[in-house]
């Protein structure tokens, strides 16, 4: 069951990473002109952080769960701030925000369960 959850999350995270890589390659470090530089840099960094988290999850590492939980919590907060604090738009105008919130909830709820069943470090051998 843990392997299935880790695989599911890793696949979805690779999809997110692909989106961030596309933005990074297509538009550079500031893909969203309306957003402050720090927010653009955070989103651009997710291309690498999402990929790292997914790889750690696929290798069965607790650090993957830890990183994924941190990424999802901060990404949801950043997107919520962007929608409401900067763009002043509602949830109905941002259906992707609802999907992000649902995925974040899934990650945060299943994270402790999965983490307890994964290894802390690579096996030596």
Image (cartoon, rainbow, N blue to C red):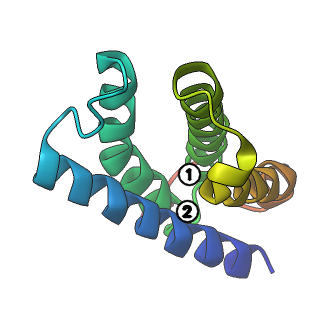
Q: Residues under labels 2 and 1: Cα distance? A: 5 Å
Q: Are marks 2 and 1 in contact (CB under 8 Å)?
A: yes
| Residue 3 point in image, percent of width and height | 68, 78
Residue at 18% from the left image edge and 34% from the top image edge: 29
Residue at 62% from the left image edge and 44% from the top image edge: 72
Residue 21's place in the image compared with 1, above or below, is above
Q: Which residue is mark 2?
A: 57
**Foreground residue, 37 or 65?**
37
| Residue 109 point in image, percent of width and height | 87, 53
Residue 108's place in the image compared with 85, above or below, is below
**Foreground residue, 79 or 108?**
79
Q: Secondary structure at mark 2?
A: helix
Asked whether the viewer can see residue 91, the reply is: yes
Q: Is residue 39 left or right of residue 108?
A: left
Q: Is residue 4 left or right of residue 83?
A: right
Residue 63's place in the image compared with 38, above or below, is below
Pick whichever of labels 2 and 1 is earlier in the sequence: 2
Q: Which residue is mark 1?
A: 64
Q: Quadrant of residue 21?
A: bottom left
């Amino acid at each position: 069951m843990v392997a299935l959850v880790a695989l599911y999350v890793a696949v979805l995270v690779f999809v997110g990473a692909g989106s961030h890589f596309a933005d990074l390659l297509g538009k550079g470090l500031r893909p969203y002109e309306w957003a402050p530089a720090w927010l653009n840099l955070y989103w651009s960094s997710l291309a690498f952080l999402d990929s790292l988290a997914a790889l750690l999850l696929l290798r069965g590492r607790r650090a993957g769960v830890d990183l994924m939980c941190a990424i999802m919590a901060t990404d949801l907060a950043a997107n919520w701030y962007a929608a409401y604090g900067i763009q002043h738009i509602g949830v109905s105008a941002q259906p992707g925000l609802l999907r992000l919130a649902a995925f974040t909830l899934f990650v945060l709820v299943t994270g402790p369960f999965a983490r307890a069943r994964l290894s802390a470090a690579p096996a030596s051998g």
